[in-house]
Amino acid sequence: MSDDSSALSTGKRDRTFALIIISVSSFISAFSGSAFTLAAPTMAKELSINTTELSWIVTIYVLATAMLQIPFGKISDNYGRKKVYFTGTIIFSSAALILGFMNSATSIIIMRFVQGVGGALIFATGTAILTSVFPPEKKGLAFGINIGSVYTGLTIGPSLGGFMTEFFGWRSIFFSIVPFGFVIAILVGFVLKGEWKAGVKEKFDWIGSLIYIATLFMLLYGFRSLPKNYGFGLIGASIVTLVIFILWEWKIDYPILQFRLFQNNNFFTFANLAAFTYYTATAATTFILSLYLQNIIGYSALYAGLILLARPVFQAVLSPIGGKLSDTVEHRIITTLGVAFGLIGLVLLIFLNSSSSLSLIILSLIFGGIGFGLFSSPNANSIMSAVSRENYGVASALVGTMRTVGQTISLGLVTLLFAVILGNTETEAVNYEPLFLRSSQIAFIIFVVVCVISLVFSYLRGKNNYFEITNINE
């Protein structure tokens, strides 16, 4: 089934079925990631894994999903999004099963990369499938429910993951998702109707794909390696290869990333820029507050985690509402309002000090949760509505890529600030508190500026909604 008729010919039952499958898959992916982050220290202690190896175990998955989404998005446009999604589910679940039996850092790193490949296949196609099967006036709600399932997974992952690690061991995190993964794969393969691909298969751009993968690897790993010298070197090299990639993509007939999608298409361009800057401005907030609550206030990890749940809870609740609103209201109104709420939350954190009340922190988290709830699904609706059907796969991959790159840069900036200002200062040192608070304040000031830029980008996308641009680029 091509995209030209899929949304019209797909019945309500099949659309609902597709939404359930993809939302459950999104929940499982988010849950496994957040739960594993909590279980990782226990795994490292049991297997005698050093800090560098543990860092790679966590990082390699993020690198794989970020680097491969755009190429896989293009492949899904050519060969069918259902095939790619099915393959990703099988790879992700199989890797999880194998990871449960691994006993060395090297083998775990390799299989985490393989699992990241599966994740990239899933993330590159899920939103595209929803766009293909849902009519324009119902896409926003579908996106909202799907994104809400992601935030739900992120919300319960730490608490449930901690329980599972405590009573069943860290391996149970991987084993627990295997049955769900294979059931989803069976449903996708044999029950989900449709294939959804472009009408004309284009030649795959292998050279552009390799340049793109190298660029993303150097950029993301560079930011994760700051402030080491090679981190700056990798970032500089990524800028050079990015220029080469853009020049190459403009030159060839069938690029993996159609830069002409950005040309004369403010709705698409500014929606992507708004996503990138918003995630850059907000992603490190939880990390900073986690350190603040534990190292400055003295709360336990469990209590700090419960406080930090405020943001994802509001995200999970409001994402379907934000998505539903985007089916009838101008996208820029909802997304700009969402960014504004997030901006208020960041401004509150500029005034964070050793005597700040807990209510200030919770209030900032609530504003951040409301902001994400109103921004994420309507912005995804903007991106997916602003491209032609044959580019749904690439556009879907861009949604995930903007998020991952923004999050990585956000954490990289905080890491750099801590390294420059805190250095090797121990948490027990007398000067740790003022140095930590100074670096945090600088970070939040930078993030406020970036969030203001996101606010401008969000508004500049224009008034168009899906019903006015359905035929753009077609």
Image: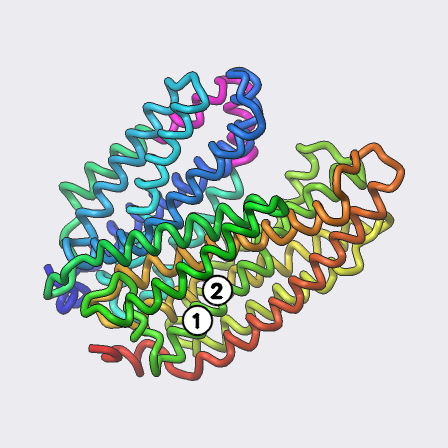
Amino acid carrying mark 2 in the image: Ala
Residue located at (40% from left, 74% from top):
269
Report the magenta residues as a range: 157-177
Mark 2–mark 1 CB contact (< 8 Å): yes
Q: Is residue 13 visible?
A: no
User: In this orientation, which residue lies closer to the viewer: 289 or 75?
Assistant: 75
Above or below, 337 against 356 in this view is: below
Q: Is residue 175 magenta?
A: yes
The answer to whether residue 472 is left or right of residue 425 is: left
Residue 341 horizontal side relative to residue 222, left or right:
right
Within 10 Å of disc 1 (Cα), the crowding (few <14, some 14-19, many 20+) is many
Q: Secondary structure at mark 2?
A: helix
Q: Residue at x 43, y 62 (%)?
A: 377
Under circle 1, the secondary element is helix
Which label belongs to residue 271? 1
Split into 4 quadrants, where in the image is the N terminus? bottom left
The residue that disc 2 covers is 275
